[in-house]
Image (tube, coloured by chain):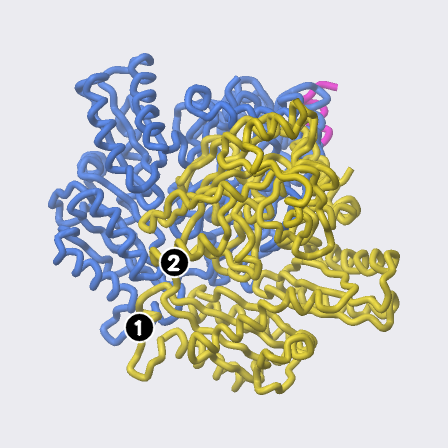
Chain colours: A blue, B yellow
Amino acid sequence: MSLHDDLVALLGASHVLTGDDLARYRAEWSGHYSPNPAIVARPASTAEVAGVVQIAARHGVPVVPVSGLTGLVGGAMTTGGLMVSVERLNRIREIRSEARTAVVEAGVILSRLHDAAARQGMYFPLWFGARGSAMIGGVLSTNAGGSNVLRYGSTRALCLGLEVVLADGRVLNLMSELHKDNSGYDLKQLFIGAEGTLGIITAAVMKLVPAPRAYATATLAARSLPDALALLNRLREVTGGLVEAFEYMPATYMQRLAEARPDVALPFGGQRYETNILVEIAATAPRDAAVAEDGTVPLTALLEETLGQLIEEGAVLDAEIAQNEAQRLTMWHRRELAAEITIARQPTIDTDIALPLHLVPEFFARIEARLPALDPGCDTLSVAHLGDGNIHYTVYPTRDDPALYDAVVEAVEDVVQDLHGSFSAEHGVGLSKLATMKRRKDPVALAVMRAIKQSIDPENRMNPGKVIPE
Amino acid sequence: MSLHDDLVALLGASHVLTGDDLARYRAEWSGHYSPNPAIVARPASTAEVAGVVQIAARHGVPVVPVSGLTGLVGGAMTTGGLMVSVERLNRIREIRSEARTAVVEAGVILSRLHDAAARQGMYFPLWFGARGSAMIGGVLSTNAGGSNVLRYGSTRALCLGLEVVLADGRVLNLMSELHKDNSGYDLKQLFIGAEGTLGIITAAVMKLVPAPRAYATATLAARSLPDALALLNRLREVTGGLVEAFEYMPATYMQRLAEARPDVALPFGGQRYETNILVEIAATAPRDAAVAEDGTVPLTALLEETLGQLIEEGAVLDAEIAQNEAQRLTMWHRRELAAEITIARQPTIDTDIALPLHLVPEFFARIEARLPALDPGCDTLSVAHLGDGNIHYTVYPTRDDPALYDAVVEAVEDVVQDLHGSFSAEHGVGLSKLATMKRRKDPVALAVMRAIKQSIDPENRMNPGKVIPE
């Protein structure tokens, strides 16, 4: 039987898609990559995923796992291949608020998990713009980050247990809800962030945290970027580590926002500052969230007091504290439009880098000194999860020239490498950073990655050609 | 040249130990294993470690890494082999309080790191009895846990970067201080907890946290174990997650303490309760630690108030709150004598298990129902990091009989497996749990571990015979 017939025999015809039914699998959100699968298989259970993988193995066909298609690095790219979508593994099997865990399948959309957790007073602390489409499988496979990493860590830190279908169809069951387990290598860590190159994640046990009882949110203008970094530590210190988000939007970001989305109000009544920060503090304890007679909660008062001191010291030039949920959401809206306003102008050269925090200002100084020699007229746009040292730095070249593109990317890489940073902070490698992996990744680390890949997927059938360069 | 001569040529005669100089490497703390190396090499740098490993490779000799020798599972066991001690890689290279990081070498003793961090107002939140001897290399290689995992996680969660010497002498440099890095597989996670079977850890970048500003510490008697678990959540909730330790000492523990160490005062004036808990809450924020006029800090008042409520509700029968540091240390002293009082009586069958929290009472019910059939006169002793579901459950059989030993271990394993627990929570596998790994570990997980080991150490030269059963 053909591959197609074998898949139909296993899954039924309605879950083996071809032709026109493939339209919605053809575009990754970024638009940089247009997957063109020949077949999309949609298994509904771990056993069916294993069956699909075994069928693929019999036919000698590679497998490209896919979930929400919100990746930005071409991780789900294929030309004529077999995509395995986990969208039908979409059950939230269990939410246990007293144990603070959620048992979820790979096809669960992130915002569904947010909602289900919220109904039990809990929060799944992974938060980013694509949460309405991204699925747990992709979130785990890319070790997704976002805006709350500062307090709660990346996906990796939020996973207690994992289930993975391996290249030969064996099921690796690591579905533990234990907080301590030293019975051998921590294998789940290997599959988290492997972008489907080692197996297909089918289910997971994720950690939940108590839903914040109140937020204190502000947009502030710092005197300088180093001042902003110093005040991050100050805020973490006075709150005892309750800062959940610390997002950087420079003046150019606000200007681009105004151009692309004139409907969105700018902070500070349009007054322009160089260094704008969205900071959010979340109250977990009742004592931090108890509403006083004047309607304030202690944490908001604390933020107000601290920002007042910082203004007096001159480190903060201006600050707006959200007085209600609507104002808070406006502040977040500005930040979450980043992806939209970044790609509104083309061509773009986008990056996703991480730096030691104290070297973030140095990065900007160095890259801005180098760009004019490459493309004197280029523009740039930055937005950053500054609390994690994670910058999305975009260059708009004056011409669509592959050589220029490469030169700019290499310049960014040079600076990042000199400053002991990472060329891929949270989006992963996929296809888009393969050349960079080859150029910049420590050769010993690359060799070890290759050895591991070879040992777990000896026929190179799981998402081949991604993450690890030839 | 002989192995010995090659090592002397590299390290100098004074750092290639043989004969009588080996005495202090012959005993692991537990006394269960007595390593008997033929040679101990003491390199002083990463390059020297690589050199030693290369020399070993040339001579076809396996390598047993060793640091503080405080392991409990025979991980450093060897008979006639080459031990590589990292004790001379003992520099704390850097402590950066504003970045909350410490760059340390593998031979740094844990308590030295505690002290160095404290001098900068920081805390390295890994705390256990052997901290005065255990070294960072072993701590990482065993993914050590201890009493603060509840709030800060195990060693794995505290490591940002790692340096490892591989079996062929290549140096894998993953010494990052980044909080986000998705440039390929997170290889450091594989070496953490691998007990030296994949390479020798030589240095690491560790996370620090701000030193707690004040502690609120209590010993309390819960009405029952389920009540204790419920009150853990209650305390985490009212404090907003500031519970650092939640340690369980049953009545039998207190009795054994009284017998073995009559010099140590019992809690509650000697009044016997079944379910004793040591709870510690740590104030990170200034508002939780500000000393009031009556000398109290808000967190102590909060603990007092909450325990008062719980006493009224009947869930707590009695409670003592430490009124000063001396009282706090007394409470901790009782708990930290666990190792001493456990091995004071022989023979022992000790275990280190983890369970989903809500199944901890069920574990005790089931194992206590099974033991009498195996050895009607046996005694038991428990002490637990209850907040992590981690129990050190010791059985004292009435006779020193290997068959009885195995039967008891298997009974514990049966119950743990039925309850989806782990037979090795924090001590690791080493030699002592090899048979259990073979019997109990998921066969697919074992196969993947073997494949990885083979891919990274194809000649099986790094700590062979440990962790992975034949």
Q: Quadrant of residue B364?
A: bottom right
- Quarter placement of the N terminus of chain A: top right
- Depth check: give the residue in front, A130 or B56: B56
- Secondary-structure class at tag 2: helix
For image coordinates 64% across by 44% down, the residue present is: B21
Residue type of the residue flagged with mark 1: Ala
> Residue tagged by mark 1?
B290
Q: Nearer the viewer, mark 1 or mark 2?
A: 2
Callout 2 amino acid: Ala
Q: Position of residue B79 (x, y in %)?
A: 74, 41
| Circle 2 chain | B
Task: Please check the rendered image and state whether residue A24 is part of the magenta-colored stretch, yes or no.
Answer: no
The residue carrying mark 2 is: B118
Q: Earlier in the sequence, mark 1 or mark 2?
A: 2
Q: What are the residue bounds of the magenta stretch?
A: A1-10
Q: Is residue A120 found left or right of A255 in the rendered image? A: right
Give the vertical position of A238 relative to B180 (above or below).
below
Residue at x 34% of width, y 68% of height:
A288
Near-viewer residue (A198 or B319): B319
Tag 1: Cα neighbours inside 10 Å, few (<14), some, or many (≥20)?
A: some
Rendering quarter of residue B414: bottom right
Question: Which numbered circle lies on residue A202?
Answer: none
